[in-house]
Amino acid sequence: MDELLAVRVAELYYEENKTQDEVGALLGISRWKVGRLLTAAREAGIVRIEIIHPRARRLGLERDLREHFNLADAVVVPRPEGADAGSAVAQAGADYLAAMRPVPKILGVSWGRTLTAVAERLPEAWATGVTVVQINGGVTLNRRAGTAATLASTIAQKGRGEVVLLPGPAILERRETKEAIMADRTVAGVFDLARRADAYLYSAGVDDSHSALIESGYLRGSEVALLASKGAVGDITGRYIDANGNIVDPALDARTLGLELDTLRTAQRGIFVVSGEAKRDIARAVVVNGLCSILITDEGTARDLLENE
């Protein structure tokens, strides 16, 4: 490739808005050579085409993620200039759920800030007659009260369906109490329904003071710090895991009210929505260890997954 000629062709075509015929006439080359030089310029990185839109996607990264991690699907959004990628990822999660075919009859959902943002962005009538079931406890202890129930109810209401709530907290004080709740007929029925869901929607929590489980009153900062010292990289549906996808504190996990991780691992449509640098370690643990089949994330997280796996 004549690099300088390729630069001139690109300048005339992209910056001066000349047609390929006009570029060829100006430079004394054929229209077909202009086309070949434009292609070569893109491949060599001389020309970089970027689509700027809040709902744009990085299709190449999506393909790489699907192939590398054997995912059923992936959605990657660019990070808006000077903005947090969380809003764009939440919108992508809402768009994906609304476009999913077949539409799930039973949708299992977790809770948290990310999924609240997804629920807020879901269009009205995204489904008809969907049953939304809560997959982990969410009766909170302080200022975040009502988050889990409101989130699930919003998704169900917008899907012209019904909601089935899990009447219990995310983490119990005693293992015996958790076992007694699990034995309750109503709670057992919720879990039975959750295990039969057609799709699951969930995110992940961080292993630091910003954890929603701390804000909700379930854990203290010192307890989360101790989990991190044991290798925890974050939580998924309230269950703290390490980089290999293993539970880091079996005693705490025995007091956690939520769907088993193996159910998510074997789900055909386990939709994991995650964004931000703080969640890259837990994102890697979830994706690498097969705890999701569909990933919706930002460009920075996608590149981190591919470059550091």
Image: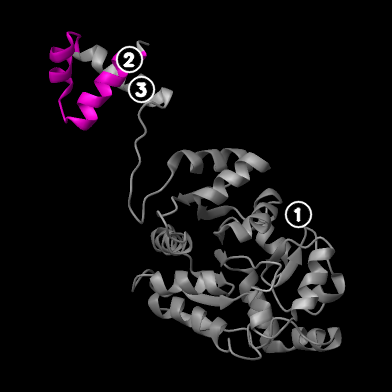
Q: Look at 64% across and 87% down and name the residue there.
A: 140
Q: Which residue is mark 3?
A: 41
Q: Is residue 234 above or below residue 294?
A: below
Residue 243 percent location from the top left of the image: 76, 54
Of badges 3 and 2, the one in the foreground is 2
Q: Is residue 212 above or below residue 97?
A: below
Residue 137 in view:
no
Distance CA(mark 2)–CA(mark 1): 48 Å
Which mark, residue 4? Answer: 2
Viewer-proximal residue, 213 or 172? 213
Q: Which residue is mark 1?
A: 243
- Mark earlier in primary sequence (3, 2): 2
Residue 241 percent location from the top left of the image: 76, 62
Which mark, residue 234? Answer: none
Name the quarter where the N terminus is drawn.
top left
**Magenta span dominant secondary structure:** helix
Relative side of 196 to 207, left or right: left
Residue 295 percent location from the top left of the image: 55, 53
Q: Is residue 208 above or below residue 29?
A: below
Label 1 amino acid? Ala
Query: Is 248 one of the magenta-colored residues?
Result: no
